[in-house]
Image (spheres, helix red, strand yellow):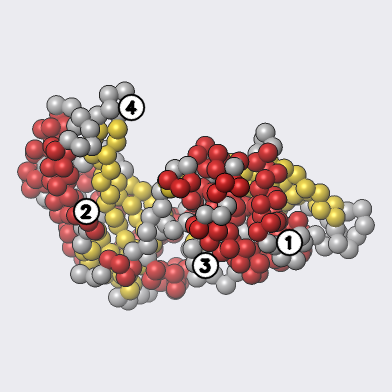
Amino acid sequence: MINFSDYYILESNGNAEYNNASIGDIAEALFASAIAAQFINRGAGINEKDIYAVLNKVMKSPSKQIKYSISDSKVKGIKDTLTCKINVPALADEVLKDIKTYKDKDLLKLNIKNIVSFVNGDRRTILQSKTFSSNGNSDSIDVIADGVGDQKGTKVDVFVIYNGKKTKGSVSLKASSNRIQNFDRGPVFDFDTHVGLLYKNLLNLPVPKIKKEYDRVLKTYKDAAANGTYKDRKDPALDAAKLSIVEAISMVSHNIVDDLNKALKKKSYKEFLVDMIQNAATKKDNSVSILDITSMKRLRFGDSFKKSIINKSFSSEVLLGKSGGPDKVIIKADGEPVIQLRPMIQTNINKKTGKVKPRVIWTMETLKGLNQYARSKN
């Protein structure tokens, strides 16, 4: 077993201090505003006031976008057109429209500080800003924060588009979160769907022969679910159901580890695993990088990533669940944890009846050890 706190990066969902909006959604808008400000300043650097100046103009616009005309620094009469657009979920949108109320809160101040530092030090952003404003051409630059677009079709949160073409300035922003993929299939008591498809569709492994034992552990919960959902989150029967789910899902985690360690001895499966990580991270789009606004490190998952990690020695082991949750699966490269498969138990509330029902979502999450293989110089 390994120590949970050594490697796990905390997940960030809705934050009560920020109108229950996701800090990640807010950060997308701040980051897009910062990139736009760097273009406006022709790569000369930005500060917090520059970010809020762009943000406030965008949020006051009914279309949530604003256009700037930037004069070429070398050729008179030539101007670039910069468009900044922000499209985020409603809760984050409300925060951004009233940003003065929230801007002095500690977490937002930290994020702003990190974003300013990153944009002022990011060679790619500075080079693009200077090049586009001094090349003698009338260029079109779009900086778009899109938190509600086609998230199945892309991994990008902030786009940088130059003359209609997406550039390598585009990022998938992570705010205190290392989740790159969710897997949610069927009710947890349905072994063939929930566990079967997890093995077939995500892990590309034969389904383990544990259905009989799995069904035995979940019998009480399955019988209760057949008669309807639990009346509320305080229902004692719900706590008992969660315990049986933890036991059943932990059993699955242990089997995954056993099966992974056998499969990882084959080069073909290692190649599948690396390919799966690349797809989960950026859908194998080499123009996209992942940016963690906590550390402000840009990570790329293209050909260089694959070459640096593919020949490492892979293994997996069980990580004990935190606070009574199900056990997790850790995947290592040369003994260093790089990926985590984490099963999460959630309770969904039926808005009409108020009753609740447990569900399990498996998430694929990057761990700190992966960064050395995905680190980007720009």
The amino acid type of the residue labelled 3 equals: Lys
The circle on residue 351 is 4
Q: Secondary structure at mark 4?
A: loop
Front-most of residues 32 and 99: 99
Asked whether disc 1 touches disc 4, contact meaning CB atoms under 8 Å apart, the reply is no
Q: CA distance from mark 1 to mark 4?
A: 48 Å
Lower position in the chain sequence, tag 4 or tag 2: 2
Say whether residue 123 is left or right of residue 135. Answer: left
Lower position in the chain sequence, tag 1 or tag 3: 1
For marks 1 and 4, give the one nearer the viewer. 4
Residue annotated with mark 1: 129
Q: CA distance from mark 3 to mark 2?
A: 30 Å
Q: Secondary structure at mark 2?
A: loop
Residue 266: which quarter of the image?
bottom left
Image x and y of residue 4, in percent = 27, 66
Q: Can residue 373 be seen from the camera position used here?
A: yes
Q: CA distance from mark 4 to mark 3?
A: 40 Å
The circle on residue 297 is 3
Q: Residue at x 86, y 62 (%)?
A: 73
